[in-house]
Amino acid sequence: MSDTGTVQDRIEHFKNRGIAALVDLTATPQRGILLARAENIDPSTVNSMVTLGKGNIFAAVSAQRARELLLEDMAALSTRHPSPPHSLAQASISVEAREGVTTGISASDRAMTLRVLGDPRPHPGRLVKPGHVFPIRTKEGGALVKFALPEGAHDLVRLTYDSDGAAFIDLLNDAGEFCAFPEVEEICKRHKLPLVTLDELVRYRLENELLVKRVAEAKLPTAVAGELRSYLYQSLIFEGEHLALVKGNLPSQEPVLTRVQSEFTFGDVFGGSNPPSRSQLQEALHQIGSAERGVLLYLRRSEPGSLTAQIEDWNTAYKRPTATAMKEYGIGAQILRDLGVRKIALLTGSTRKLEGLSPFGIEIVKQIPLQKDNQTQEDSRT
């Protein structure tokens, strides 16, 4: 690696250098970005990032900042607005600084827009839409909740500068493709840039931070799986509690049959005669009850208004996948670690190989089909 030492050493290097590289080794293809603090970025830094990265400029901001700046979700907008060159969850319409810019495309203009996005006192009146910088609303909890480069970029800026707002750009080669890890290493070596991988960042945060804490436990008799042990975990990043139902002993070295599912209150409790989400819960409990050991994680949704959306549009809600998106398992992984689980046999409706838990210290040894006749086509993706 071009930059040796601990992650803390590389964070210090980032603080001195002003630009860092971050790589997702689990992505297909591998993908790397350059990042810098948005709050006080200058034209020289933007120019260096654009010259080396060759991609579009993005700004990773917290959900709270996105609300304060009145940033609109890309998915809710008409096709007349420009879109990011590749799919990014939580993308907002592109923006421009209202004052101090000309065409908006120059390094000076984009630096001005980024400084507005990263200003400690956000003001929506200082932005116009559309523009040449694409804001990305990150998940609260960062890469420990969603294992993705925008969250990682935001984490690094927060850890290094205690600042909300990271400018970042994709590292592309001359063919316009994402740079693989060796190419990113070579760029960092040539330009003396610190390099961190997403899994290193997650491990660093896991050693220093927690997102959940165990607050209660009790025995729970169930009609499907018999008596289970229930553990209640409180989220430290949003108001909500998560439930872990456990059967048998959980040795860290043996694979544990595991199902991770997000709450879907309307379907799980009230809606329909036999909605997919409720069927999945019952089938998971049945399979866990038949095993020697197992865990069902029932995770509280963090998005506000999710229950309202379910009630207002039951047809859409009925078809919505209910298993936790496999790029957002930081909360579930921390609960599994607290329970002593290190290897899992994952109960899932997906036929494709699921990866990404290894940075959290959890190994998916195998995937076991979650059998149910009425699973929807959408649900089979998770």
Image (cartoon, helix red, strand yellow):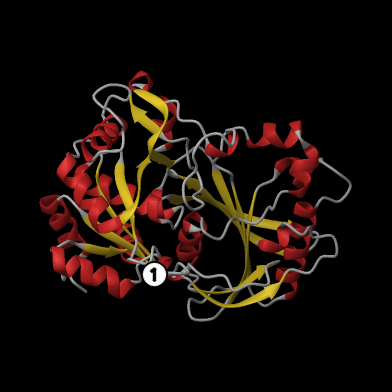
Quarter of the picture holding the N terminus: bottom left
x, y (%) of residue 369?
Answer: 72, 73
Quarter of the picture holding the C terminus: bottom right
Number of marks drawn: 1
- Which residue is located at x 40 percent, y 39 percent? 135
x, y (%) of residue 167?
Answer: 29, 44
- Which residue is located at x 49 percent, y 53 percent? 86
**Would residue 380 be found to the left or right of residue 217 on screen?**
right
59 or 310, nearer to the observer: 59
Q: Residue furthest top?
A: 125
**Would residue 140 be found to the left or right of residue 197 on screen?**
right
Amino acid type at image mark 1 = Leu
- Which residue is located at x 47 percent, y 35 percent? 93
x, y (%) of residue 320?
Answer: 71, 48
Residue under pointer 1: 25
| Residue 342 visible somewhere in the drawing | yes
368 or 44, nearer to the observer: 44
